[in-house]
Amino acid sequence: MTFTQLPAALQSWLRTMVERGSTPDAVRQALLAAKYEPRYASDAVNAAWRELVDTAAVLTESERADSVELLNRPDASAASNAQPAPAFPLGSQLADMPNRLQTSDRVVEMLFVIAAPKVVLFGNLLSSDECDQLVALSRVRLQRSSVVNASTGAYDIHPDRTSSGTYFIRSENELLQRIERRIAELVDCPVAHGEPIQVLHYQPGGEYKPHHDYFDPSNAGNRDVLAQGGQRIATLIMYLNDVACGGSTVFPEIGLDVLPRKGHAVYFAYSDDTGMLDARSLHGGSPVVEGEKWIATKWFRQRDYGGPGE
Ligand code: PD2
Ligand code: ZN
């Protein structure tokens, strides 16, 4: 493998690491932590060092030590846009394209898979009774939904998001424990990496304009949310009722509308094949035309999440 054969985004990240004076081993470890294949990680690092090290700026020993320390910091992912996001969870299960995935308490159907951006539609993830219970528990504690203001970090009410919602503390009750365990098994991501489940309710006309669920690391206002468990890496939206008309989850970059079906769930990850954030994961909730819409959302982080709701 030569350096120029690597994906452009990975080349640019490796170049940044070399210029910062990182050691080959630290860079290889970062790639492994980001779930790159060990062989691929070693080859990519070797190729980068062959190509780049002679031309990289000469660093003093202390600059070199600083840069290695930066790379190894737990929240290094937030330090640079060029840092790859980890490979998406659920990757290994998809290799054989099984029709169904067995969790410890339920068989979940795989209804479709899109390769890029990674989108999977699950059927039968929740039973009808589990959906009804989540709605009943949420109905009594709904509040108008907010969005994170990327400049200030504050949670603001915004016209782009006309739903109301509530959170469940992780493992709040037996129902949540069961669902969280099932999801963790399904997408192969530890329960501790999941944010608390959020339930949203949309009335007719209610919508959530297209957005990315990951946090832009270059926005200072996102520093606090990124400090809690690192970057978000994937979303699971579970549909808790059938909507008479409208209310699809729309992916405008790829022309996909997922229509809500009670018990189904759409999963999507935000990293592309090179491990970089994939802007094609842009998605929104299109306006409900008739009836109401209830969903439960689970976001997954790079590491243990200890933020609000914990
Ligand atoms: O309600 C939806 O379909 C939807 C759309 C976009 C939910 C979310 N984003 C979300 O919860 O992040
Ligand atoms: Zn979203």
Image (cartoon, rainbow, N blue to C red):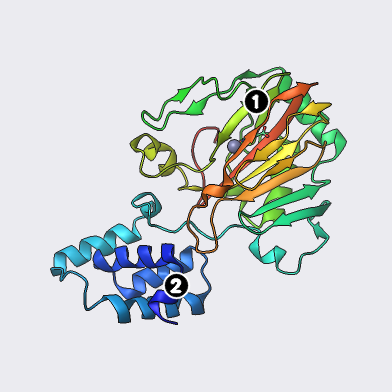
Depth check, front residue: 271 or 136: 271
Depth check, front residue: 17 or 301: 17
Q: Quadrant of residue 112?
A: bottom right
Q: Quadrant of residue 210?
A: top right
Please tell me whether residue 31 is drawn above or below residue 216 in the rendered image. Answer: below
How packed mark 2 is, by other alpha carbons closer than 10 Å (few <14, some 14-19, many 20 or more), is: some
Furthest residue in direction right, as rendered: 128
Q: Is residue 86 left or right of residue 242?
A: left
Residue at image position (66%, 32%) is 285
Please tell me whether residue 26 is drawn above or below residue 139 in the rendered image. Answer: below
Quarter of the image where the N terminus is located: bottom left
Residue at image position (74%, 43%) is 265
Which residue was labeled with disc 2? 6
- The circle drawn on residue 207 is 1
**Tag 1's secondary structure?**
loop
Is the residue indicated by label 2 positioned so its CB lies within 8 Å of ligand 2?
no
Quarter of the image where the C terminus is located: top right
Residue at image position (79%, 42%) is 264
Circle 2: residue type = Leu
Instruction: State the image coordinates of residue 295 (x, y, percent, origin top left).
Output: 71, 32
Instruction: State the image coordinates of residue 299 (x, y, percent, origin top left).
Output: 59, 43
Res 252 visible: yes
Q: Is residue 41 left or right of residue 18?
A: right
What is the CA distance from the residue labelled 1 to the residue labelled 2? 40 Å
Q: Quadrant of ligand 1?
A: top right
Residue at image position (28%, 75%) is 52
Res 233 visible: no
